[in-house]
Amino acid sequence: MKTASITRRNVNWGNIAISLAAPLVALLVATGLTSALMAISGIDPADAFSTLGSRMSERTAWIDATQRAVPLYISAIAVAIGFKMNLFNIGVEGQYRVAMLTVVAVGTSVELPPVLHVTLCIVAAMAAGALWATIPALLKVYRGVSEVISTIMLNYIATGVLAFLFAEVFAIREEGRLNPKSEELPKSAWMPNLVSENLHNISGFIFVAAALGVAYYVLVWKSRFGFRLRASGTNPTAARTAGIDPKRMVVSAMLLSGAVAGLVGMPQVLGDKHAYSSDLQLGLGFSGIAVALLGRNSPVGIIAAAMTFGFLDSAAPFLDLESIPKEIVVIMQGVLVLTVVVVYEIARRVKERRTQERASRSLDAALAVAS
């Protein structure tokens, strides 16, 4: 009984209240700022929000939002792994593009039973993403090159190399087709849809994304490797003193992040297009950075952030129908991420100050009793 009462007294309800209030405050501030920007641009905020609100009651809207959220979730997990090591992997965009063309090359060159064929494609995608991420990892460890600079440059290199290879080697140009595409993957390499209603689908790749989320949580928070990862990211000097090799952890984190990044484009290649083409959805790597920031690198938080982005992306065309520029969705997403980052930083500082004040009062009380 005494232990239970002590535990209840030690609960810092003030910090809990701050943690719960932070996302609500961020949402309110983001809504206010977005409304002000729309009003300045001559757009009625009520019309925009009512259009978005009307979509929330439609089943197909959530199907589309989930389909769009799956690659965003995978991309954010890849980015979050780097964040936990204090690494900024901006190269997810290039890593998953390399993986998409690699999977097409590997998948069209073999014939296997369905499950094995899909598995081979997934392994090939992860290997390609990890291999492309090895370059900035080695540059950082052995030459001290910032991963921010190297990954950005590698994105451009990947874009140019892939465009050349696609145009000269893989592209099949058919008469009457505006967008050339590669040879189509055999049906044994197709990922079946979990939900299919007319043109609204949810790829079965959602199960792979869910497994990645669980693996990310277990690896980062429940394993020795995860402890070493977080320790190295928080304080490399202290980690080195404890026997953790920071260079090895940098390479491991970048390879793991790249391997996950390689899966970002698989819902399209295996579940939708079944080929590499010029009309594939791009920019998912950069969107993943925003989703990871919005989700605070938490598996559950990233789900909420990915669904938010997915819903806004799927609802954007309906804004056009109401003569509201669909680009307002991008503004909403940007303002939301910026607001969340600022509000959470303020909340963190407030909680730290409250903790310090609480510790100071406890120390003063202890000294008073001792004297």
Image (cartoon, rainbow, N blue to C red):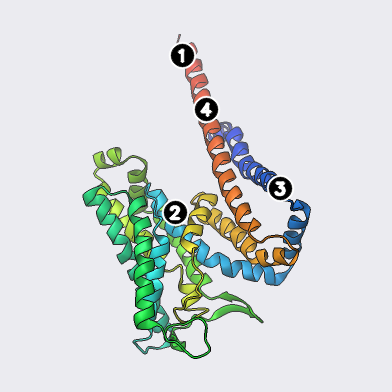
Badge 1 or badge 2: first in the primary sequence: 2
Marks 4 and 2, Cα distance to the nearest angstrom? 27 Å
User: Farthest left residue?
Assistant: 142
Q: Are marks 4 and 2 in contact (CB under 8 Å)?
A: no
247, above or below 236, in the image: below
Task: Say whether residue 260 is left or right of residue 65.
Answer: left
Report helix, strand or loop for mark 3.
helix
The residue to which callout 1 is attached is 367
Q: Which residue is drawn at 55% across and 35% down?
A: 346
Q: Number of labelled discs?
A: 4
The residue to which callout 2 is attached is 80
Residue 323 is situated, as x and y percent measured from the top left of the image, at 74, 63
Marks 4 and 3, Cα distance to the nearest angstrom? 33 Å
Q: What amino acid type should be assigned to the residue bearing mark 3? A: Ser
Marks 3 and 1, Cα distance to the nearest angstrom? 53 Å
Report helix, strand or loop for mark 4.
helix
Task: Say whether residue 305 is left or right of residue 218.
Answer: right
Q: Are marks 3 and 1 in contact (CB under 8 Å)?
A: no
The residue to which callout 4 is attached is 353
Work out whether residue 194 or residue 336 is closer to the camera in this orientation and state it: 336
365, above or below 334, in the image: above
Q: Residue at x 63, y 70 (%)?
A: 64
Marks 4 and 1, Cα distance to the nearest angstrom? 21 Å
Badge 3 or badge 1: first in the primary sequence: 3
Residue 31 is situated, as x and y percent measured from the top left of the image, at 68, 47
The residue to which callout 3 is attached is 35
Q: Which residue is drawn at 38% across and 46% down?
A: 86
Q: What amino acid type should be assigned to the residue bearing mark 4? A: Arg
Badge 4 or badge 2: first in the primary sequence: 2
